[in-house]
Image (tube, helix red, strand yellow):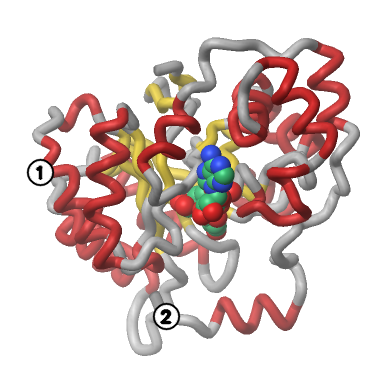
Amino acid sequence: MHNVTLNNGVQMPILGFGVYQIPAEETQAAAEAALATGYRHLDTAAAYGNEEAVGAAIKSSGIARGELFITTKLWIQHAPAGSVQDDTKRAFDGSLRRLGLDHVDLYLIHQPLGDYYSEWRAMQEINKEGLARAIGVSNFYPDRLVDLIDHNEIVPAVNQIETHPFFQRAADQALMRERGVQIESWGPLAEGRNNLFTDPVLSAIAEAHGKSVAQVVLRWLIQREVVVIPKSVRPERMAENLAVFDFTLTDEQMDRIAALDTGASVFFDHRDPAMVSRLGGRSA
Ligand code: NAD
């Protein structure tokens, strides 16, 4: 497996397995199948409600902890009567307990909403204690990311953001690179939106390599040095999504895919006030 090196020296596999929207009762089997297929990097979140199942799969796999890279995420801490920093530590302890682990490899702020500066200060301590080998953020647009960096001690190791052929984030990636933040794609296959799997440009490139559209898209992201965490509950697709290290897209093919960018989300805008209120009001 190819790794990227994060800004604190931690090695992160460039390809992992995401478990968003897998129902809790199906997640253990899916994560076990992913580990059996060869994935060593799993991406979950407190808000997905399936950390326990991911932990059970890790345990039953028998794979040495040092071979695995486990990411989970902090949901927005409301702390009505207390301190967001204390609540962040409690939330982190809850994630560790549900995962059955004594540390995670990457802990992310899930959304740039609420008092995430207090959350980040608690996470810096969690990082210094060695309980999260790296800490980062998710869904941060460049302005919020730069502000967080400029007013804190530890630079986020990762920003996990929607990134796929229809929303490519090239300028965001350039800014992150300048600031030492690794880009990680969520929704690398755009969850199939905009007819991604039958897109004529992607299909023609896939045919030229004897590969699937999913493989071409994942390969394109990896060649851009974007970390990817595709999700599937089907073992044959898990294997397909992992088999992307035996071919290379040409510059011309990379350019043809670059032309598919619409510059906008295919899901929702994190800067839409209605969405900010909706997400911000949710509990994990
Ligand atoms: P994705 O782009 O990985 O799409 C997953 C869907 O694509 C599957 O449900 C399946 O229908 C289809 N698919 C997968 N492999 C395929 C293949 N080889 N051929 C045909 N169809 C295939 O979408 P995602 O699950 O939203 O994103 C991946 C991961 O990113 C998530 O599981 C989660 O871990 C993370 N994520 C994070 C956030 C965030 O806010 N940080 C948001 C969404 C997702």
**Relative vertical location of residue 220 with respect to residue 127 in this rendering, above or below:** above
- The image quadrant of residue 185 is top right
Which quarter of the rendered picture does the C terminus lie within? bottom left
- Which numbered dot is residue 283? 2
- The image quadrant of residue 236 is top left
Which quarter of the rendered picture does the N terminus lie within? top left
What residue is shown at x 75% (from left), y 40% (from top)?
165
Element at badge 1? helix
- Which numbered dot is residue 3? none
Mark 2: which amino acid?
A: Ser
Question: Between disc 2 and disc 1, whose residue precedes?
Answer: 1
What residue is shown at x 66% (from left), y 50% (from top)?
190
Give the tally of numbered discs: 2
Mark 1: which amino acid?
A: Ser
Q: Nearer the viewer, mark 2 or mark 1?
A: 1
User: Is residue 152 in sight in this rendering?
Assistant: no
The reply, left or right, for residue 270 in relation to residue 67 is right
Q: Nearer the viewer, residue 275 or 39?
A: 39
What residue is shown at x 13% (from left), y 28% (from top)?
64
